[in-house]
Amino acid sequence: MKNPILPILLICFTIGSCFSQTFKIRGKVVNTENELVPFANILLLNASDSTFVKGTSASENGVFELTGIEPDLYLLQASYIGTGSKPLALDVKKDISLGALIIPSTTENLDEVVVTARRPTVQRLSDRLVFNVENTVVSQGSSWDILKSTPGVIVNQNDLQIRGQSATVYLNDRKVQLSGQEVQDLLQGLTGTVIKSVEVIANPPARYDAEGGPILNIVTSKSIVPGYKGSVNGSYTQAIFPKFNLGTSHYYKTDKLNLFANYAINPKKELKKKREGIDFINDSNSIFSTWETNAEEIKRTAAHNGTFILDYDFDDKNSLNFTSNLSFNPNQERQSILDTEITNTQNQIDSTFVTDNFSDVDNTNLAFDLSYIKKLNKEGSQLSINTHFTNYDGQLLQRINSTYFDANQMFIRDFGFTTASDQNIKIFTGQLDYATPIGSASFESGLKYSSIDSENTIDYFDFSGNGDTVDSSLSDNFLYDEKVYAGYFSFVKNWEKWSMKLGLRGELTEAAGTSETLNQTNTQDFFEAFPSFYLLYTASEKHSFSFDYGRGVERPRYNDLNPFRFFDNENNFEEGNLTLRPNFSNNFNLNYTFNSEFFLDFYYRDNGQFISRRLVFQDNENQTLRASKQNVLESTSYGIDFTVSKSILPFWSTYTYLSIFYEDETFLAEESGNQPFTNDLNGFYLYFGNYLNLAKDGTLTGEVTLTHFSNYLFGSYIQSPTTNLNIGLRKSLWKNRAIISIGAEDILRKANARYSSQYLNQDNFYRTRYETQFIRVGFTYNFGNFRLQDNERGIDKKERDRLSEE
């Protein structure tokens, strides 16, 4: 097969050779007492109409630099917490080094070097929404708390979603290289005080993998001065069972070397209750048997997470970055007791059975990432090379035993079996990127290769008693091999009131999944192009409009393709689908911003034949319930999002997010003669956050948030409404060297939803109660030069996102 990437790359680098001369502006920001003002906003405006041209933020020591400025007349202004310097007129014909921009002092500016908390702000860029949280009340929680409070983010069963799609989490533009619960554990241990902003990228540009979906990028403050800092932190949570976590971080910086090390342990004992009901229906569409199950699961885990990062600057133009992460979760225990009651049409008990389901789980996730960055002679140009390796290993040993009784509780029979499964996944990627300015525009291009090798085994043994739905022939070996070759370019141009970004990515995929027991192989061999387009129009200082479009792909997760069965009991199980295919989607967004406080978004998404992972089918004849995955026939989503970020009083600011949406998906009802069925609904989501500054020096802050979710589409299910009310307080001690916090969540006890599936000859529901109601107390102590910001980051590899827990 001819490789179509080479022509794209040649075009990209040919365009990148053209450029024109641009200049720099350097300076610092102080107040009227000549004290440095860190993190002030720097705005460069057109002198003719005061429209925005370029902006940046001052560093921790108040220094700033603007680059890539074309010759022209400009106004330069610094602002901080509602106060700004006088606009300074500049005629840019060469590099300019200023003295200082002076911001009038206010009682809210600085207390020594401690910045008073202020309300978060939201900024609309051409391809993303930027939620600025540094030194705000929002930053007092963990990174996980901040993401849950970010505009446009919906939290559904601990899944962070943007417009109904699961979001990928990045740290400093590099993907968090963990899966499932590990991501939440990591972010709950990362303090929000190091976060500068969160970027919400609903349509990722071409430099991101086409499979990326929406992205939440956490941007941390940059390191400025040499020194050492460290911290220890911990929290205690009282839910049904008590929980705690402990962590420590250490950072050391010299002029050339940056070292960061972090370790955290998060032992948990969790209780999950589940109530499930099934009405089995005969050929005359009448209920002939009803099953109701009450289950309690106790899960014990002790997740360990360690990170080591090394950055070395050989000189001003050459740097090396190494990141490693180990996530280790050994000896996990999950024990479920399921009590099932079977009644007839007269609502009389026919029989009952009790299932004991016990699992031992071990997961290890080891990743290495190495990057080299070369800054070229042309200002703003650079070449970067990245390599990455991941080794994921997971084992599961499951023992299931059921005992059956008649209506008089007399023993009928028993049945039990054991399964042992093992999964090993190796991921390797290599990437080359080139970026350069072209006058007032900029250009990026690159190549990427990824290789994924997955081997899975499952064995059934130790059968006891009598059963007819599980047998040893279900044992299997599943092999998956995938290679993706990609190339991209993007072009950004700013002029007058307009900003435009064009991108094109091409990906060649060669993949094969083989089930040895089924003697079946599914191959994927295709090349696809993924264009993206962004346009921003700034009508005035208060009004701006933007439009964006992007095409994306979703590949099946490795476990989705795996045809293995995993059982709750012999009548209730989940299985993969070897025939799943990649899905292609088209996303359109139209946005309006007023005064950087009011945001209105209209979106439409053609989800295509996306992979629905929560389709459950009841076999009425054999009285079983099977959870499966399927490429749906079609699916669409559209809606309106409205956001307001506003100060009510000097000590009280609010953030409101309202999303009104429509969702549908048409799938094959596999246990209803494979009839197409469309599941759809209209719904809304409301988030109302209140942020309180309860002390003049900003050392005591509070937060009250209310979240309400109406009905929501969840595969073949409809989710019932939920409401979640949370409150929290945070106190800084000893000039921010120590922090203590207390919070209470799910005060109304209405955060858990009921899921029901009623169509054709299908009628079942379930309701799961997690430990969402709890009180948490946290404490952090910083030592060394604790205001030094570190180089913590994640690892940007989309391939790892398809690692999913059982």
Image (tube, helix red, strand yellow):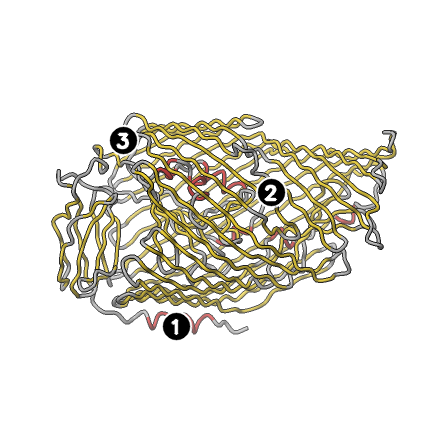
Residue drawn at (13%, 64%), measured in percent from left and top? 93
Q: Where's residue 789, x and y in %?
A: 31, 40
Q: Kindly identify the amino acid type of the residue bearing the numbered disc 3.
A: Lys
Left or right: where 625 falls relative to 395: right
Q: Where's residue 339, x and y in %?
A: 75, 33
Determine the CA span between mark 2 and mark 3.
Answer: 51 Å
Q: Name the residue under label 2.
A: 394
Could you tell which of marks 2 and 1 lies nearer the N-terminus?
Answer: 1
Q: Quick one: 494 or 182, which is closer to the camera? A: 494
Q: Where's residue 452, x and y in %?
A: 55, 55
SS at circle 1: helix
Q: Name the residue under label 1.
A: 10
Q: Kindly identify the amino acid type of the residue bearing the numbered disc 2.
A: Gly
Determine the CA span between mark 2 and mark 1.
Answer: 42 Å
Left or right: where 747 falls relative to 629: left
Could you tell which of marks 1 and 3 lies nearer the N-terminus?
Answer: 1
CB atoms at circles 1 and 3 under 8 Å apart? no
10 Å neighbourhood of mark 1: few (<14), some, or many (≥20)?
A: few
Q: Quick one: 683 or 265, which is closer to the camera? A: 683
10 Å neighbourhood of mark 2: few (<14), some, or many (≥20)?
A: some
Q: Name the residue under label 3.
A: 696
Q: Kindly identify the amino acid type of the residue bearing the numbered disc 1.
A: Leu
Determine the CA span between mark 1 and mark 3.
Answer: 59 Å
